Image: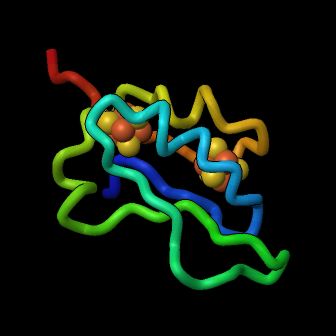
Amino acid sequence: MPKIVIDEMRCKGCALCTIACPRGLIRLSEHINKQGFLPAVISEEDLAKCTSCALCAQMCPDVAICVFKEKKRA
Ligand code: SF4
Ligand code: SF4
């Protein structure tokens, strides 16, 4: 399962998540979405470096980022 999923349709390309990520893993796409914005994207390679800290999702004003955390086993 991916650690984060960015909903490109909800994204307005404000880039706040790109600033919020302490690892600099998110960037804006070079292609516009159906709303006419450059949506935030993360590569497969960078997804592997994601810590699921959720700072990007907390920063997003459009609730376009879902963060998944692995359950700790007892
Ligand atoms: S969850 Fe944290 S490490 Fe992962 S992309 Fe978002 S801000 Fe970056
Ligand atoms: S903070 Fe949200 S709306 Fe702004 S670029 Fe990131 S995902 Fe898109």
| As drawn, 55 above or below 56 | above
- Give how far across and how far down residue 8 sits, in percent: 65, 68
Nearer-the-camera pick, 69 or 13: 13
Nearer-the-camera pick, 72 or 46: 46
- Outermost residue, top side: 74
- Outermost residue, right side: 35
- The residue located at (38%, 61%) in the rendering is 42
Splitting the image into 4 quarters, where does residue 53 fall? top left
Where, quadrant-wise, is the N terminus in this rendering? bottom left
- The residue located at (84%, 75%) in the rendering is 35
What scheme was used to colour the molecule? rainbow
From the viewer's perspective, tell me whether residue 17 is left or right of residue 13.
left
- Give how far across and how far down residue 61 sits, in percent: 76, 36
Nearer-the-camera pick, 23 or 47: 23
- The residue located at (34%, 56%) in the rendering is 2
| As drawn, 73 above or below 25 | above
Q: How many marks?
A: 0
- Give how far across and how far down residue 52 sits, in percent: 34, 34
- The residue located at (68%, 59%) in the rendering is 13
Where, quadrant-wise, is the C terminus in this rendering? top left
